[in-house]
């Protein structure tokens, strides 16, 4: 899940979950608490508006009691002179945060509160209410009282007035409990929502960042042998994945650098060893000339030719080293052109044949490609490939009569060149590695035959840069066949 999506979900959770849960909590508390209010105060129905309209609440609470007082005033008004009855009525009213005052001819008969400071001043006088019903009004002062009045006449004709006085400064206890429960519930809902979001975000954001921090510390300390495992697929997960790829590349680069340094040490060792032999020969024959050992024209010519041949060997070795450095930095200079396969290989084999004839090595050549078959290649580099393969074969010819067969075949979209010899062959276990740089199938043999171990690696690089493929088959004590294939050039018809 993307980080943007997570933020949107978190925003929706923050907005909707608390509101929804708070609404459900309020509905539940409303049902139970308002039902208790209705049962406790004999209110006909519980209504949530009581929370915001205290006057309405207390009006409903005392309505039943006032109706009973009104009925008594109409049926038996003298009962309001009975103190015991008045105390019973007042006790009921006190449970509803109210008290009773009875007046007769504007004189107090009964006051149902001990705190006379709470009694409203200047209570209204008797007023003829034709219906004899109750009237009420609200005094908005510090006391905030609601007063209900009932006017009636005693049996002797004296004027009587009942006052039911209710203090509305405070809510009923159930209302307080309801408000407290709602506030606590909202706080708990907010804490629960915040906790859930914190855990979710911590696991999806903070945890990957912690892992990324540890991975960074490992790399800082030079440790690349670890794996950064992240399961998320958000932006942070992508960052961690990119970091893991970077770590793997750094590790591969470090391993490649170590391998390259090892190869370079091997190369230097090989070059030093391979240069030592011709240099020793050059030095020995030069000393022979200077010391007069070559005292005949024939010996002098022999010594000079030997020095010349050894110098050529060193020159060839240094040329290979120079080419290798270009291969290692991908700076081989290629000059690609269209080449006629028949003509090119005919000329190339003719040149090779002269060298092989001088070394008493037989050569067979078969070209099965058509006269018009062409390839795109660099003639000089392709010739280097053929010469390197043949020179490698010559080194390992151990038969009294050596031979080399060259075959050029047309195989569909490719031309395939096969160079076969009857040399020592290559062991099966060594065959997969013969194109690796500095690989020597037999170190002791190569010490005698020379070679830096980079000839075939140069061949593979050139063929691959031509878009071709090279491989080999071999059987020990029988010989080796080298194959390479290059794509034929085909004209694209104009439409």
Image: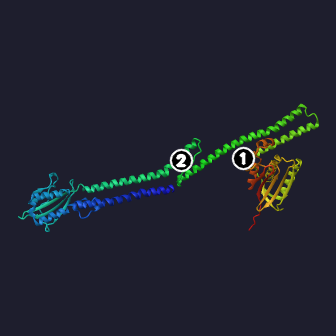
Q: Is residue 448 above or below residue 199?
A: above
Residue 104, percent across and down?
Answer: 9, 60
Question: Which residue is denoted by mark 2 in the rendering?
Answer: 212
Mark 2 vs 1, N-terminal side: 2
Image quarter of the C terminus:
bottom right
Residue 447, percent across and down?
Answer: 79, 41
Q: Which residue: 75% across, 53% down?
A: 471
| Residue nearest the observer in this picture, 474 or 288 | 474
Question: Which residue is denoted by mark 1 in the rendering?
Answer: 328
**Looking at the image, how many numbered discs can be counted on the residues?**
2
Which element is circle 1 on? Answer: helix
Which of the 4 image quadrants contains residue 80?
A: bottom left
Which of the 4 image quadrants contains residue 438?
A: top right
Q: Which residue: 74% across, 40% down?
A: 268
User: Marks 2 and 1, how far apart in space?
Assistant: 35 Å
Q: Residue furthest front?
A: 477
Residue 429, percent across and down?
Answer: 73, 49
Give residue 249's mark.
none
Taking 489 as reference, is 29 left or right?
left
Q: Is residue 463 above or below residue 372?
A: above
Q: Is residue 362 above or below residue 312?
A: below
Residue 47: in sight, yes or no?
yes
Q: Residues within 10 Å of mark 2 (few under 14, many from 20)?
A: many
Which of the 4 image quadrants contains residue 416?
A: bottom right
Q: How is the image coloured?
A: rainbow
Q: Residue furthest left?
A: 156
Residue 56: in sight, yes or no?
no
Taking 378 as reference, is 117 left or right?
left
Q: Residues within 10 Å of mark 1 (few under 14, many from 20)?
A: few
| Residue nearest the observer in this picture, 112 or 299 | 299
Residue 393, percent across and down?
Answer: 81, 49
| Residue nearest the observer in this picture, 407 or 60 | 407
């Amino acid at each position: 899940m993307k980080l943007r999506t997570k933020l949107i979900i978190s925003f929706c959770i923050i907005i909707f979950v608390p509101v929804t849960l708070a609404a459900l909590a309020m509905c539940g508390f409303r049902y139970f608490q308002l039902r208790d209010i209705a049962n406790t105060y004999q209110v006909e129905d519980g209504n949530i508006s009581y929370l915001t309209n205290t006057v309405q609440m207390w009006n409903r609470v005392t309505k039943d009691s006032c109706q009973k007082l009104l009925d008594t005033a109409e049926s038996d008004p003298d009962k309001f002179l009975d103190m015991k009855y008045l105390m019973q009525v007042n006790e009921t009213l006190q449970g509803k945060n109210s008290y009773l005052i009875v007046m007769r001819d504007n004189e107090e008969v009964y006051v149902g509160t001990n705190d006379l400071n709470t009694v409203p001043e200047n209570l209204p006088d008797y007023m003829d209410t034709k219906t004899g019903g109750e009237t009420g009004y609200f005094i908005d002062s510090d006391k905030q009282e609601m007063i209900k009045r009932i006017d009636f006449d005693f049996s002797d004709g004296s004027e009587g007035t009942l006052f039911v006085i209710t203090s509305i400064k405070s809510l009923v206890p159930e209302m307080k409990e309801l408000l407290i429960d709602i506030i606590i519930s909202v706080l708990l809902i907010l804490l629960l929502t915040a906790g859930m979001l914190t855990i979710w975000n911590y696991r999806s954001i903070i945890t990957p960042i912690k892992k990324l921090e540890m991975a960074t510390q490992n790399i800082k300390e030079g440790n690349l042998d670890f794996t950064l495992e992240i399961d998320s697929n958000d932006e942070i997960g992508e960052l961690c994945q990119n970091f893991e790829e970077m770590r793997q590349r750094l590790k591969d680069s470090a391993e490649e650098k170590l391998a390259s340094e090892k190869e370079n040490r091997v190369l230097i060792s090989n070059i030093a060893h391979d240069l030592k032999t011709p240099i020793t020969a050059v030095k020995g024959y030069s000393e022979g000339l200077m010391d007069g050992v070559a005292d005949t024209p024939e010996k002098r010519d022999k010594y000079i030719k030997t020095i010349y041949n050894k110098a050529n060997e060193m020159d060839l070795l240094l040329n290979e080293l120079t080419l290798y450095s270009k291969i290692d930095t991908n700076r081989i200079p290629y000059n690609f052109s269209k080449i006629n396969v028949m003509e090119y290989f005919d000329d190339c084999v003719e040149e090779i044949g002269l060298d092989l004839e001088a070394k008493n090595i037989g050569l067979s050549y078969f070209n099965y490609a058509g006269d018009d078959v062409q390839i795109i290649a660099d003639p000089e580099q392709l010739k280097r490939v053929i010469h390197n393969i043949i020179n490698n074969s010559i080194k390992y010819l151990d038969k009294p009569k050596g031979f080399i067969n060259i075959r050029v075949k047309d195989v569909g979209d490719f031309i395939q060149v096969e160079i076969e010899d009857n040399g020592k062959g290559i062991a099966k276990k060594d065959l997969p590695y013969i194109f690796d740089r500095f690989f020597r199938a037999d170190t002791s043999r190569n010490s005698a035959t020379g070679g830096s171990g980079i000839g075939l690696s140069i061949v593979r690089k050139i063929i691959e840069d031509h878009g071709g493929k090279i491989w080999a088959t071999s059987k020990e004590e029988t010989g080796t066949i080298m194959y390479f294939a290059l794509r034929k050039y085909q004209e694209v018809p104009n439409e």
